[in-house]
Image (tube, rainbow, N blue to C red):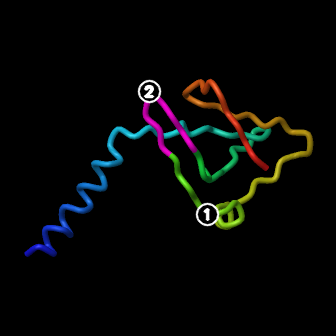
Amino acid sequence: MKKIMVAVLLPVFLAACQFGMPEPPKPVIAAGKEKVEYQIGSYSWGQNGKGVEADTAGPEELVKNIDYSTVPAGSNVVIKFNYSPSHMEGWK
């Protein structure tokens, strides 16, 4: 009986821990007229006094199942958010 209770209550508890945690906004990325598919890697995000850090696989592993888009050289890359971040960093 205890095993069944743990099996039922553990997912509920874990879901409750995530409730109300901030998530970074999901951007829409386009190069020229082509929408660019992406995966979000490791990040730290804070909002309204709450914060979260997420660690993911490395870049090579994250993008191995993404269909790459080919756009002409010199195309502009546009990143749009439904949210205006006050600070953003990226690593290559």
Residue 28 occupies which quadrant of the picture? top right
Q: Is residue 30 above or below residue 62?
A: above
* Disc on res. 48: 2
Look at the image and tell me in which quarter the N terminus lies.
bottom left
Q: Residue at x 16, y 75 (%)?
A: 3
Q: Position of residue 29 (x, y in %)?
A: 68, 40
Q: Position of residue 9 (x, y in %)?
A: 19, 61
Circle 1 residue = 57
Residue that protrudes farthest toward the left in the picture: 1
Element class at badge 2: loop
> Counting residues from the N terminus, which is met first, the one under dot 1 or under dot 2?
2
Q: Position of residue 69 (x, y in %)?
A: 76, 53
Relative horizontal placement of residue 31, taking residue 27 as reference (left or right)? right
Which residues make up the magenta segment?
A: 44-52
Q: Residue at x 11, y 73 (%)?
A: 2
Callout 2 amino acid: Asn
Foreground of the two, 71 or 53? 53
Q: Is residue 85 magenta?
A: no
Tally of numbered discs: 2
In the rendered structure, are the residues bearing label 1 and label 2 in contact, judged by CB atoms less than 8 Å apart?
no
